Image (tube, helix red, strand yellow):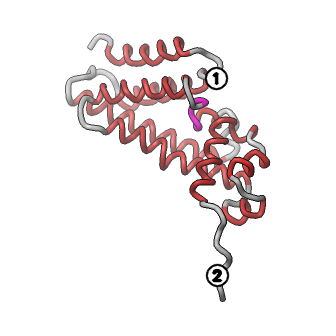
Amino acid sequence: MSPGPAKQFEPDVALEKAMDLFWAHGYEAASLSQLLDAMGIGRKSLYDTFGTKRDLFLKALDHYGRTQVRQIRNELRAPGSPLGNLRRVLEGFEASHCQHRPGCMLATNVANFTQNDEEVAAALRRHLESLTEAFAATLQRAQAEGELRDDLDPTDTARLLLCATQGMALLSRVMGHGQLHRSARGALMLLLSER
């Protein structure tokens, strides 16, 4: 049996473009025609390569985890001061939300789904938990190196940071840079208070 014709597009490039659109608009607001235009493919290519719009969204979420979430984890694990790494990550969130990115893809889409959609909710939770674990590991390192109060529970504090960063992502859609800057600074001040 001879192989089918070669694809006339790069699936990874198309998936990146789909991720960007879901990131900017959310699942519901990203129409199929917008996705096809952004990806530069036809409907048949979409279904043959990625499946339905929902399948494409789940693949785009996984791509987000492999690229954006992994980058954050790597920045938090970088050599040097753990709290310094955390500060840079929070400042990066702030700058990203205020400049070229419409918040966080996870936060943008959490607003579109509930736990009733078990598959999507599980995918979103998986990436949010990955961020939480990265925050917790950074806080544990900071405690071990004497940068952070010993009375803070790293996991609980990591969950608080997750709420803060996802809240910043949503608020960036309607609030200015100054408010986000104060939010990021406030999160750090809470960690360092009464050290």
Quarter of the picture containing the C terminus is top left
- Going by the image, does 13 lie left or right of 80? right
- Give x and y (percent) for residue 27: 70, 41
Residue highlighted by disc 1: 173
Secondary structure of the residue carrying numbered label 1: loop
The answer to whether the residues at label 1 and label 2 have Cβ atoms under 8 Å apart is no
Q: How many angstroms separate mark 1 from mark 2 (CA)?
A: 47 Å
Residue at x 55%, y 50% (from the top left corner): 62
- Give x and y (percent) for residue 120: 64, 47
- Give x and y (percent) for residue 24: 65, 35
Q: Amino acid at mark 1?
A: Arg
In this view, the residue in front, 195 or 39, is 39
The range drawn in magenta is 102-106
- Going by the image, does 49 lie left or right of 131? right
- Going by the image, does 70 lie left or right of 23? left
Task: In the rendered structure, find residue 82 and report the number of the disc placed on it.
Answer: none
